Amino acid sequence: MILVTGGAGFIGSHTCVELLDAGYEIAIIDNFSNSRPDVLDKIRTITGKDFKFYEADLLDRDKVELIFKENKIDSVIHFAGFKAVGESVSIPLKYYHNNITSTLILCETMAKYGCKKIVFSSSATVYGDPATVPIKEDFPLSTTNPYGATKHMIERILTDLYVSDNEWSIALLRYFNPIGAHESGLIGENPNGIPNNLVPYIARVAVGTLDVLNVFGDDYNTHDGTGVRDYIHVVDLSKGHVKAVEKVSKSTGVEAYNLGTGTGYSVLDVVKAYEKASGKKINYKITDRRPGDIAMCYADPAKSLNELGWKAEFDLERMCKDSWNFTVKNS
Ligand code: UD1
């Protein structure tokens, strides 16, 4: 059985669907800090399969231990964590305490029960402002905010764990910019309050709950001056987790993998693609750069193809179409 922490969240829920479809038995632990209980039934509806669920906080060591006592957990996919960059700058201790301590409790419990296979939800944020693009896994790591620092530190903790005990098998998945939604429109990304990220914000402008998109700067050194990112369909990303679970089950070691498409699109490219997918006009205005943003970030996904046998399949048009379908059904 696979334990999925944060399995009710955006990427977690889509990954649970792919795991169940691939025939895995799973248990989910989630405290709904940034998700909703109805997601669980939606995963059941999409897959026609059931799973175990624990409503608990990973900081609750006794609850975590209970899961390992009650089930034979073979491997863990660890999504749970706070992820808002701006909030992490204002409340760093909350981020360090939650993201780091929960991972320590999880790994200590895994070690106690002899489960040494983990897939970790990391981020391309660990590359900081890369000197060149496309980004390869061996590029130097640096971070500029507490959220990113927790991802970097957890990668380091897991690496040290492997060095101390070579029976561990660890995949560090560095996500680029996950967007889109399941084609059913049942699960997707629906942040509380005003979205921080581009596509959820555009979706609200398209559906009419927000008036205008602020484009953060048009003076970057990119083809149209706006920031370039590697947007990846969340279903493709989720399939990468299934491949990573297969990989950690049959080998030991610690390896980082980029999960991106290898193609960069600018903010205005995404606006155009979303207008086409939704048939709606996206009003936007150019504003100042957002502090901490970089000009360009996109992956070299060759290692993931060579070692995991994974590559992204869906294009930007499909990402926008699925995001719009989810938005219409859930607004
Ligand atoms: C952000 C985080 C990153 C995190 C990722 C998770 C920052 C600085 N980085 O990535 O650490 O791993 O989310 O999803 O927050 N944009 C606008 N207007 C908006 C929102 C965004 O123009 O209202 C632009 C940004 O300047 C950027 C692009 O859209 O060029 C993508 O932004 P966003 O979706 O927030 O993702 P990242 O900043 O790449």
Image (cartoon, rainbow, N blue to C red):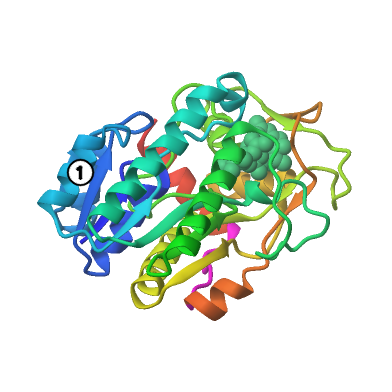
> Measuring 37% from the left and 69% from the top, which residue is drawn there?
167
Q: Tell me how many marks there are.
A: 1
Residue drawn at the location 13% of the way across and 50% of the way down: 69
- Provide residue 195's location: percent of width, then percent of height: 54, 29
At a point 21% along the width and 69% down the height, the residue shown is 23
**Residue 118: horizontal and vertical position, in percent?**
38, 59
Q: Which residue is mark 1?
A: 65
Instruction: Please state the horizontal and vertical placement of residue 41, each as a whole percent of the image.
Output: 19, 43
Question: Would you say residue 117 sits in the magenta stretch?
Answer: no
Q: Is residue 55 visible?
A: no
Q: Position of residue 62 (x, y in %)?
A: 20, 36
Q: Is residue 244 visible?
A: yes
Residue 7 lies left or right of residue 311; in this view the side is: left
Task: List the single residue furthest toward the top.
Answer: 90
Nearer to the camera, 309 or 289: 309
- First to last magenta residue range: 309-316
